[in-house]
Image: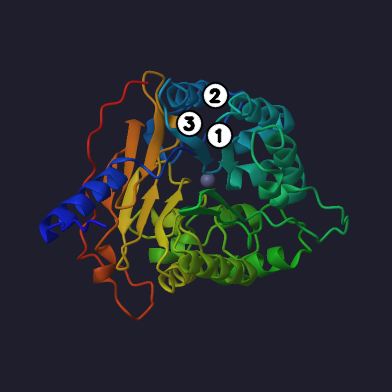
Amino acid sequence: MQVVFIPQHLVVLFIMAVDSQVFKDPVVTFGVLTDVQYADHDDQIAAYDPSKTRFYRGSLGQVDDAFNYWEKPGSKVKFVLQLGDIIDGLNRFNGGSYTSLRRTLSHFEKHSSIPTFHTVGNHELYNFNRKELATLFYESVIKIDIPQEIFSPFKPLKDNRPISSPVLYYKFSPVPELKCISLDCFDISVLGYDSQHPNYIEASKVLYSKHGHEIFDDWDCDGPLTGLDVRFQQMNGAVSREQLAWLDQELKESDDLGQKVIVFGHVSLHPESSDWSCLLWNYDEVMKIFHLHKCVIAYFSGHTHKSGYALDSHGISYIAFSGILEAPPDTSAFATVSYYQDRLEVHGHGIERSYNIPLQGLRDVANDDNDATIDTEVEPPPPTTVKVEV
Ligand SMILES: [Zn+2]
């Protein structure tokens, strides 16, 4: 047998060449869009920002434009995350809730080769209770090319007790190296529940304690709230103890498997990623769970209708995405995300921002106290400009 001696420096070069190829190709690429808020309603100025117009009928064309981009020849997009508020609360006033949801979901169903994973928003719950919503989403997602066990959260409940409710959080792994977790940000809320449900009662106690009254409609404004307390509005909610325990277990499993995790939900977690009125009530508890583990790389949210970014002391990125509803007809608002072993590339289209986020080395700055402290000394990567034709 002939033994060939390979100099050490050539071994190093070979490893570098293999590594660079690994980092050159994304592990997986996917699309993100949010806040479609379709309604058969005339355009109108956004109440929270007079500089913005809400294009209620145009939002479905925006969804089509995004899929047309993702379906172009050569596209590597494997799936889409829809971050909530798929139809607008206006639908409930004209009896159009069902028609509008069906019309909107059909725009996702016709692109079944790129399956969409939905997360629940407050506007869906203005139109439907959680049982109705689970049934309607289940009827939609079984039409697309996804293993059906993934959508067990949406299966209609056979239990007809008034206080029973479906569990709307779930996970899936598009590739072995990555797990995606959808949070139910309205698990504890006054939306979508019968008023006798324990989660409604728990949420109403929180809102009463913060606002000092029990007037439902007046829970949807700042009222007496100041600072970070402005998040305690009925358009937001909290993640329950059960969901936190489930999240902790899922992250532990991913740690053990060496997987990375992207978590997504409708409402924001990091106060520097969005307006404080758009934060999860117990955002700090969710971040503490993230910090117990090594696997979480990012959290994606909608709801605020504005691009936002924050990096926490544990190297986790929090990205809030722009809403499709307010994208003018001559532009767009969606993102194409590529996860590489060493970075996350977010290519914003139209009014959406772009980011190039390194994933290695960031955890070196993490504190060991496992709290949800915001480290403002860690600079987030500046948005990058990526020109993309849609
Ligand atoms: Zn919302």
Residue at point 51% right, 70% down?
Answer: 252
Residue holding disc 2: 60
Q: Which amino acid does label 1 sit on?
A: Gln
Ligand 1 is within 8 Å of the C-beta of the residue at disc 3: no
Q: Earlier in the sequence, mark 3 or mark 1?
A: 1
Above or below residue 78? Residue 308 is below
Q: What element carries label 2?
A: helix
Q: Where is residue 231 in the image (x, y as percent from the top left)?
A: 47, 60
Contact? badges 3 and 1 (CB < 8 Å): yes
Precedes in sequence: disc 2 or disc 1: 1
The x and y percentages for residue 348 are: 33, 35
Residue denoted by label 3:
325
Q: Can residue 95 be seen in this view?
A: no
Residue at 31%, 68% (x, y): give it. Answer: 374
Asked which quadrant contains residue 101, the reply is top right
- Picture quarter with the C terminus: top left
Q: In this view, does 104 lie above or below 303?
A: above
The residue closer to the viewer here, 375 or 212, is 375
Of the numbered discs 3 and 2, the one sitting upstream in the chain is 2
Mark 3–mark 2 Cα distance, whole angstroms, equals 9 Å
Foreground mark, 2 or 1, reads 2
